[in-house]
Amino acid sequence: MIKVTVWNEFRHEKHNQAVQEMYPEGIHGQLAKFLSEDEVIVRTATLDEPEHGLTEEVLKATDVLVWWGHMAHGEVQDEIVDRVHKRILEGMGLVVLHSAHFSKIFKRLMGTSCDLKWREDGGNCRIWNVNPSHPIVEGIGEFIDLDVEEMYGEHFDIPEPDELIFVSWFPGGEVFRSGCTYRRGNGKVFYFQPGHETYPSYYNEKVQQVIRNGVRWCAPTQNAYPTYGHYEARQKLKV
């Protein structure tokens, strides 16, 4: 069983009626609901909990961390970012959703600004599958159509992805690298673009399937974490 922690700021839902109506149990609640239908164990954590809900104990018991954030990236304590970063290097997976492209942890992992173009105009979106043999797109088909989604456009200031999974198109003519994977240390990272807080993207069955697939892909392997630092020779050296 894969052990998943879904992290969400849980701020929009407390102050914005439209978000409350769209996600009455919080975005984390909706993500946890459909992930729980898979063969995973799911817990949730939010920004205003002690240590943002990401204690050492919670992270040690987490195989994959799913992260959603938007309006309070700066409130995430650097100590917690360090803690999450260390766990990813050790092998914990990370699924980064929508505006979490600006989260401290994603920017730390990418080493770039992670900036982009955006527009909230109620337009539609077509998410093209450009890597059809990849496990993350299992059961998805050639594309995902969303009736409404926030426009994200290039240039997306991220390093060249290890694998490009999706490219999105918007009616204003923009395109966006909307599904990207990376490896950092022993850990795997998947960024997926859909998920504006007032739109129903996380109720879409194909979006849900991508996130499920992403969690499975990001799950740790049994590979041993490497040793670093001073190292004794494995065989006698000739001097």
Image (cartoon, rainbow, N blue to C red):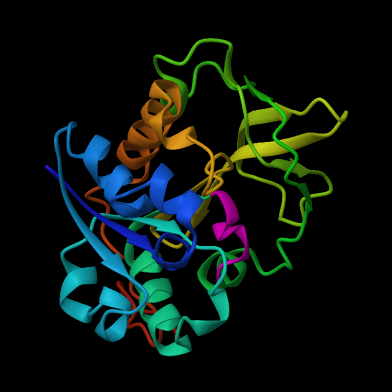
Is residue 238 in sight in this rendering? no
For image coordinates 30% across by 72% down, the residue present is: 234
The magenta region covers: 98-103
In the shown orientation, is residue 131 left or right of residue 48? right
Horizontally, is 41 left or right of 141 in the view?
A: left
Q: Is residue 102 magenta?
A: yes
Based on the displayed image, in which of its 4 quarters is residue 128 positioned?
Answer: top right
Toward the front, the furthest residue is: 17
Residue 6: where, in percent of width, then height?
30, 56
Residue 164: x and y, percent?
A: 63, 34
Dominant secondary structure (helix, strand or loop) of the stretch shown in magenta: helix
Please check the rendered image and state whether residue 8 is part of the magenta-colored stretch, yes or no: no
**Where on the picture, by quarter, is residue 87?**
bottom left
- Give the vertical position of 19 relative to 217 (above or below): below
Q: Is 210 displayed left or right of 181 in the figure?
A: left
Residue 130, placed above or below residue 193:
above
Instruction: Provide residue 70's location: percent of width, then percent of height.
Output: 56, 63
- Identified at 11% across, 42% down, the residue is 1
Q: How many marks?
A: 0
Front residue of 223 and 149: 149
Pick the residue in front: 173 or 17: 17
Could you say where residue 121 lies in the image, as x and y percent from the top left? Answer: 75, 39
Q: Nearer the viewer, residue 23 or 113?
A: 23
Outermost residue to the right: 173
